[in-house]
Image (cartoon, rainbow, N blue to C red):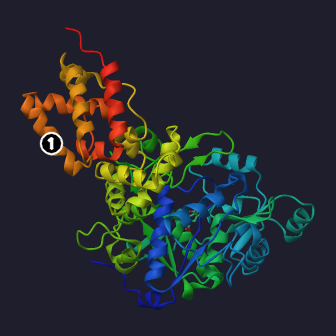
Amino acid sequence: MHLVNNTSIMEREVRVRFAPSPTGPLHIGGVRTALYNYLFARQHGGTMILRIEDTDSQRFVPGAEAYINEALRWLGIEIDEGVREGGPYGPYKQSERRDIYREHVKMLLDAGKAYIAFDTPAELEAARAATPNFQYDARTRGTMRNSLTMPADEVERLIAEGTPYVVRFKIDGGRDVEVNDLIRGKVVIKSDILDDKVLYKSADDLPTYHLANIVDDHLMKVSHVIRGEEWLPSAPLHVLLYEAFGWADTMPGFVHLPLLLKPDGKGKLSKRDGDRLGFPVFPLLWTDPVTGAVSRGYREDGYLPQAVVNFLALLGWNPGDDTEIMSMDELIKRFSLEHCSRSGAKFAYEKGAWFNHQYLQQLPDEELAELFKPVMQMHGVEPSGFSPEYIRKAVGLVKSRINFVVDLWAHAGFFFKAPETYEEKSVRKRWTPEMPAIMEEMIGWLEELPDFSAAAAEQPILEKIKEKGYHMGNVMNALRLTVVGECKGPHMFEITELLGRDETIRRIRRGIETIKAPQE
Ligand code: GLU
């Protein structure tokens, strides 16, 4: 069914790049793009480049680049060449490559493939107002103020005077432009629908995204451009730029990954969906440097990086069978462009929670305990007040019930803080008038136990309850109520074993003193 038949592309040394613009926190869709690039690079023994595309100074956000680095590090997406790693084709930050772009703009100008335009914003506005659907292109450029319509000496004079100008790409009309997309096949568009894109602005002496992106992909010997579907409309222009430079022979293979869609409908996944449905759309917590607004992140929400990687890998790709749990190494082995889908992938965030659950179960209890410590602190409990073994056992007893590390508190918090309140519904149901006296008896039985371990305690205590003819359900739940504060949690005698005899008895006493028998 697939169209990956361009052998020359497949035989090239694989060099891919992740090329984010540092305009804010990396979106989860960007993370998936980085991941697919990485999987593809590693599978082919190729090179993974991280290029920072910061030519749009208006949209530059401080902290965004550091955030990108930290997110990739956290997820285990390793970079071979980049700003910090260095490499033979640096610098890897576009704002440090001005000379290279200037030189390439000149190459296009000299070859007559681009031209200089002086139209002011007001003049462009007027052109748009005068002509419906105005587009700066082969049909209209002859009516505008540019080096194609103005005498050469005037152009030179304006430049010498420092008049701001832009360089536009001269796109010929009447052509079919072919983009060879490795998952979508051949995409053909008419060059007439393209406008003469601005490639460079003299005002800030910087190229636009399109020029910088193509020049760098070429100079960095990028073999495959793997990026989000939102860049597909730019691809024809990129193909034309490759041709204009005379680089058509080394044009990379294009791969436009399917959009991530809203979990509950059509349309692109947005931050608002996350806010509305309660899931992060960013890998790490992000604090907006201007507004101070905080956006939650997968890391801080308690996701394990392995789970996020596994979850994202399957949003737009499948291994060809129904395997779901795959480590990074396995993903590297199994990844293939053939099994990337063309249609959008619904962002089923609950599945992310499911993956996290699976990976948490695989984690040794020691590691889980480490992850739990900050959560304890969040709840005002100092981990050093408990032995490592105690914390480890507590998380071990409840981990099968959790999807997230933070959930551990709801299930195991009582191991670290004695209950202060008691769930009302269970009090009403279980705390019968004779219960305080029965609990006094219970204390006696527990004190007498020679061995307080779960295995040794269970039978004798249950026997006593039976012997006395007490209501088993009420007594055991009343006990649980005093110890846990509510009628849920792991096996009762596992709980008492871990709490220990003294703490268990202390809690029962407090229950007897504080739980009010329900009013008739
Ligand atoms: N700088 C673009 C971005 O932010 C890169 C797009 C591409 O990969 O060509 O996604």
Name the quadrant of the C terminus: top left
Q: With 420 as the anchor, is 125 left or right in this view?
A: right
Q: Quadrant of ligand 1?
A: bottom right
Asked if one can make out residue 35 in the rendered structure from this viewpoint, the answer is yes
Query: Residue 427 at x, y = what percent?
Result: 25, 22
Position of the N terminus, as image quadrant, is bottom left
For residue 212, side relative to residue 400 (left or right):
right
- Badge 1, how many Cα within 10 Å: few under 14, some, many 20+? few
**Vertical arrangement, residue 299 with respect to residue 439, above or below:** below
Amino acid of disc 1 = Pro
Residue in the image at 44% along x and 60% along y: 367
Residue at 42 percent across and 51 percent down: it is 391
**In the image: residue 403, left or right of residue 520:** right
Q: Nearer the viewer, residue 222 or 380?
A: 380
SS at mark 1 in the image: helix
Residue 278 % position (x, y): 41, 41
Q: Is mark 1 within 8 Å of ligand 1?
A: no
Q: Quadrant of residue 354?
A: bottom left
Is residue 197 shown to the viewer in this render? no
Q: Is residue 400 above or below residue 492?
A: below
343 and 352: which one is in front?
352
Q: Please state which of residues 347 and 475 is positioned toward the viewer in this rendering.
A: 475
Query: Which quadrant of the structure image shows residue 461?
Result: top left
Horizontal and vertical percent for residue 152?
Answer: 85, 71
Quickly name the residue at label 1: 460
